Image (cartoon, grey):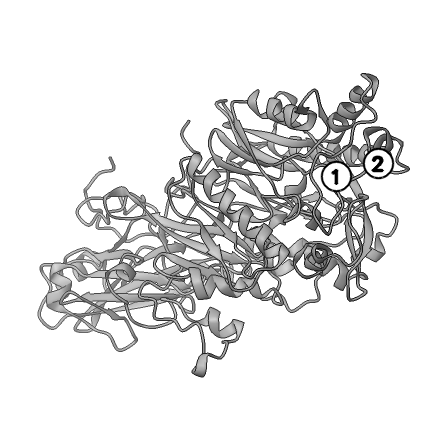
Amino acid sequence: MRSRTRIRTRRPSRLYPAGSLVLALAAAGSVLAGPAGSALAAETGGRADLRADVNRDGRVDVTGGSDKDGEDRWSVGRGAVYLPNLDDDSKRCPVSGPGGKPLSDAKLAACNDGSDTKVNGSADAADLARVRSVPMPGLGKEAQGRLKVTTGGEHARVFLKRSGKWTAVTSKTRLTAAELRSGVEFGVEGTDVVRDSAKWDGRAVVRLTVTSGQKSTSDSVTLRVAPLLTHHHLQNTQQVMVTEVQGEGPYSRLQQKFVAELGKEVKKAGVTAPLVKFKKYADPWTQDFVEPAYVSMTGPGGQRHVMRVMLRSAQPDRDAGRELFEKVRGRDVGVVQVTDRAEPDDWSLNSMGNLETIPPYAHGGRSFPAGRIIMGERKDSGARPSKVMRTMLKSQGLQDPLLLDTSWLGVGHVDEFVQFLPADTPRGWRLGLADPQAGLKLLRDAKRDGHGKTKMFSVPGRSDIPAPKETIDQALASKHLVADNEMAAQRIAANLEILKRETGVTDGEIVRVPALYTRESEVMTAEGDEIPVPRLTRMGAGSDLVDSLGDRGQQKWLAENPAGSRAAAAATVMTSAYVPGAVNGVLLARDRYLAPRQWGPVIGGKDIFTQAVTAAYQRVGLKVSYIDDWYTYHLGMGEVHCGTNTLRDATAAWWQRPAR
């Protein structure tokens, strides 16, 4: 423990370059403006001494020195933290205008607990980071104090606790001598997350100035707004989110059945919280319009105080994101909306299925204690996800996004070929990777053993949709299938080399999961619109399901945006899952994995893809269950992962590697 002895000498001045955010400190730490320190301390009854929770133990130490060292600096491992107060604890924010008219996206996002100058009840008070002044018992009755946010004032607000109530600190606020003698409690909130660290790096410098007569003494503390962090798979699932499409149409009934089955699987995995169901906008791709994230600081008793933050996709025309404000925002749940006014390189790349998180690791001199984001880009055309979104994610300072090449995928999302799985190893996790070569081997082995006439797919047809017709022989003889999967294997291997280089993951830490991809084919909706679908001989033009895919599938944007980056990369073969993509499933618990039902060739009474997928996951200790998403998501160029989302436990300290 650091010494509790208070040193009464003036700190040396620091020099900072012009424009530095820290320049506003004037001089860091305790500052004396006037005669020699010892004389002033005697005349004013002591030095001003402001303290914050620098060591992040949930307590502001005003009697010892544990929170004194480094109070004017901030690093990932040490320094006071405050929350961006983006939730709506008392549910005061309107979700509709007069007469029930929809609010604009901007108005929906404008209201939260940080947008007013009040503390809205005890739950809102819990979101404030505490700052305290050390008691100055020798002060004369004429003394008074002022508090000012000298850096970050546009994004931080301070409240004063006076007579048991919280009051916003303004330029007119004065602290009485009596308050300063006994010590004052303050609360700090942020009004936003860091959007661009080149403009604001999240720091707030709070300065207390105590004046007695013509003499004054000051002290400052530096806090940094908590970084907005995405979840990784070492955090346990606490709740699952899914869209439940309303209505009585064929697709609606199928999708409602999927939701019911999902609820059963979630309960079997030990997740007791009910499903969060989005019902208003009929966008079934719950993975894509939101990325659950969080901010946290240490609260009373050393317990982590967590605020969930729903990160809306940078797709302003995607109305489903509005339901995050209308339905989900509330106590300890906020929403962040990104506005990128530039024309997107590729709208689909801005879906959140194109954002996954590598679990915590350290390699090559870099450490990522909260994990690291991966996103897909189209190297063949140069298309990347929203620059504004990438800037915001990088500006958090902890999860610097790593870009992988998804040029070869029609939808272009990283969740279509890679995942991360918990492991009882020194690293703590493994990498799950789609393996097209293993998928081809399953077919070749079946053909070699005399099963070439077996149907490639065992999924039953529907009244308006014929069952798939091709056999294993026909699939292997296809003009493109083998070549496309060899290409996919090469693309995946190139991405694996990036992941190895960046993380240090080894071949022994990779779970290779059989997969097959197929290039896109065009089908016609009843309205005469062509939409891309996985290239299979199974769908009649103009069927209800084809129309539903045109309205709700990943194809919706692909059909509406045929030009741009996709056209620029015309030579690139675009693929999606042929057999439902097993890696595109949901980790429901550390040992429970929910995969899309494979509907592969049945030989000897067993689905050969289901057997192989189950074996791959079982070898690393995972119990696998399956859910049918063929007509609801697979034909829409996605799987169960694309149609769901998870809220995970974020109580671990983001500045420390998880204990194993």
Whether the residues at callouts 1 and 2 have beta carbons within 8 Å, the answer is: yes
Q: Quadrant of residue 542?
A: bottom right
Location of residue 136 in the rendering, given as x and y in whole percent from the top left corner: 14, 59
SS under mark 2 = helix
Q: Front-most of 189 and 627?
A: 627
User: Residue at point 82% right, 22% down?
Assistant: 447
SS under mark 1 = loop
Q: Front-most of 112 and 65?
A: 112
Q: Quadrant of residue 441?
A: top right
* Residue annotated with mark 1: 578
Q: Which mark is residue 481?
A: 2
Separation (CA) of disc 1 from disc 2 = 9 Å
Location of residue 589 in the rendering, given as x and y in whole percent from the top left corner: 46, 34
On-image quarter of the N terminus = top left
User: Residue at point 15% right, 63% down?
Assistant: 180
Q: Earlier in the sequence, mark 1 or mark 2?
A: 2
Residue situated furthest top in the rendering: 449
Res 509 visible: no
Label 1: how many Cα within 10 Å (few below 14, some 14–19, many 20+): many
Location of residue 20 in the rendering, given as x and y in whole percent from the top left corner: 49, 60
Q: Which mark is residue 483?
A: none
Q: Front-most of 508 and 205?
A: 508
